Amino acid sequence: MSHALKQEQTFTRKMNDLQLEEYLAKTSIHRSMFKKLAPLVYPVRYLLLAVVLVEVFQVISIFVRPWVIKYILDHGFTQHVERLVLNWNVLAIALLILSLSWIARFALAGASKYLSGLAGLKVLNALRCRLFAHIQTLSIGYFDRTKAGRIISRADSDVDVLEPVLIQGPPELLSAILRCGLASILLWIIYPPFFWFLFAVIPVLLLVTVFFKRSSQKHWGRVAEERSRFTAHLVETVNGAKIIQQLNYAEQNQRHYQQLLDDFNQSIIYGSKRTSWFAPFTGVLSTLATAAFLVIGSYALSEGNITIGQFAECIFYVFLFLAPLQEMTDLFERFANGTACAQRIFLLLDTQPTIQNKPSAHQLDQLNGHIRFHNVEFAYTTKPVLNQFSLTIEAGQVIAIVGPTGHGKSTVVQLLTRFYQPQAGKIYLDRYPLDEIDQASLRQHVGIVLQDNVLFSGTILDNLRLVKPEATDRLLVQAIEELGADEILSQLPNGYLTQVGTLGVNLSHGQRQLVCLVRAYLADPTILILDEATSAIDIYTEQKIQYALRRLCQNRTCIVIAHRLSTIKEADKIAVIENGTVVEQGTHQQLLSQQGNYYQLYQSYLNHQLNESSSS
């Protein structure tokens, strides 16, 4: 392994979770989100335009009310001798206009909520689908190094937080700006000193808002990070529930989770202490502005510069100008929270697969199945797993790879399927270097049955249909029968319609393996890899699938990796791996006659079988 790679792996081991995500994404989390978020709302631009128009009319309906008050006060009363007489016609008109404005207000508010909600669903669903699709493209190495809970947090709770920012925030901000702007214009028209006085408040507010925004965004970034941590721990707990109970680790695990929750709560409390001053500050600013306005307005009224109706009207305009200042607290909190979550979402989206197709990658319609490893070196960490590994597998050959645990057998499979990339050396498939073959095309020709294969929720037939979506039930059942798996699978409570449960939990290990073998048979790959495919299976089930394995290996290149040497004696060739290197090759009889590494492994196996027989 190269010195540069060792340095890189040593460097990354010292990082915390967030620093590692930044390293994998090759970018910093602290960056502007406008260019990233703007394209998200482009597909719903017409809906947002409709929301903007609704908000404009909604603001207009609000400004009708102060005018109605002015109209009543200035025109609704007539001086008769020593008393004022109410003009009922003016009052009726004013009440009618006021009623219509309220009706319009409620109708427009409902329309705005509906349109913004519809836009929000479209944007967030598209973002979730984009995240889901992107996650499926990431290289397996990313999932090895990133906690599952952090990925789930990005695609779930972080996306939810974006909705108020992307959809609700802009219309509300527009409404606040329109109310401030229109109120300012009307105050200027009625009495310019009112406008100049309120205008003096704006620089103070802007300066304080900039400081608040920076502090708030940093705070919500810390909150989002703490949320990711306890979510990650929750996911790990769910996945490891059996081990936790077996080890009696539940109490300690609960304490650790509680500590993560306490850290999350403390981050919220700390942030609240840092940002809670903004709302009272805007409240004080609004109170002072209102008091000063009353003084100025009273003087203007006494001088005859404005009417009583204009004075009352301007009071409403002042409140319409100042009210958005207090709303800014909530708006900026949501903006800061949403921006912090958006930074984490795009940190994931900007992470590219480490293994990608080359522009000139080959699409393979046909494949013979010849495989050659040439001086391959690979390490997951600083310790090499494969070291100058070379092995040739002829097309149509059944080869068994054996060796002690942890010496690189399964790694050969991981490299052949391009889940990982060798750090040195080359792998060839037929005449093509493996890294020059399109990955989707490669995996159409390479089938794999692992020790712990995954089944998805649904029936047995549903899981088989994953590789042949168009297959009929009869075709699927026929494949089960051809592999001899029907005798076991048909005895399940609901036969082939039995629900396998999450990850196949309703089936035994042997039953799951049988389903996976049938699935591989239906895929009909040119190259078949059986990685510990018969481990942890009872003798009866193992005997039942020996015929299936032989049939699966017919007319295709087959790589068998197993600890049970009984499953590989009939292989055309056996390769023995130790310390990441092929130390012996040959048939079963040839290797036994050499009395080398394979001979020792086989003797250990026989002794183990003898001990099991004696104890039973």
Image: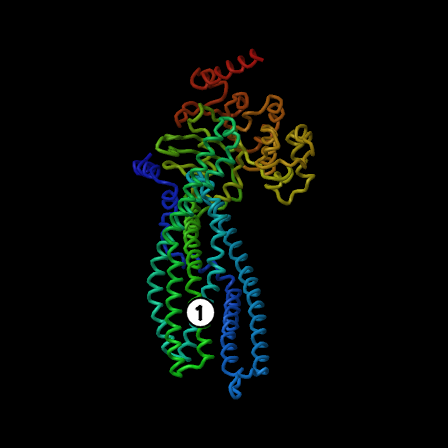
Please identify the quadrant where the C terminus is shown: top right
The answer to whether residue 93 is visible is yes
The answer to whether residue 432 is visible is no
The residue under the point 39% across, 76% down is 297
Q: Residue furthest bottom?
A: 81
Image height of 179 relative to 28, above or below: below
Q: Secondary structure at mark 1?
A: helix
> For this view, does 582 lie left or right of residue 76?
left
Image height of 92 relative to 356, above or below: below
Q: Nearer the viewer, residue 79 or 334?
A: 79
Q: Nearer the viewer, residue 97 or 79?
A: 79
| Number of marks in the rendered image | 1
Q: Nearer the viewer, residue 320 or 505?
A: 320
Q: Tell me residue 369's x, y (percent).
A: 51, 36
Q: Residue furthest front?
A: 82
Colouring used for the render: rainbow
Image height of 339 relative to 236, above or below: below
Q: Tell me residue 504's x, y (percent).
A: 59, 34
Q: Residues within 10 Å of mark 1 (few under 14, many from 20)?
A: some
Residue for badge 1: 319
Q: Tell me residue 50's x, y (percent).
A: 53, 67
Q: Quadrant of residue 582?
A: top left
Please identify the quadrant where the N terminus is shown: top left
Identity of the amino acid at label 1?
Answer: Phe
Q: Tell me residue 201's x, y (percent).
A: 35, 68
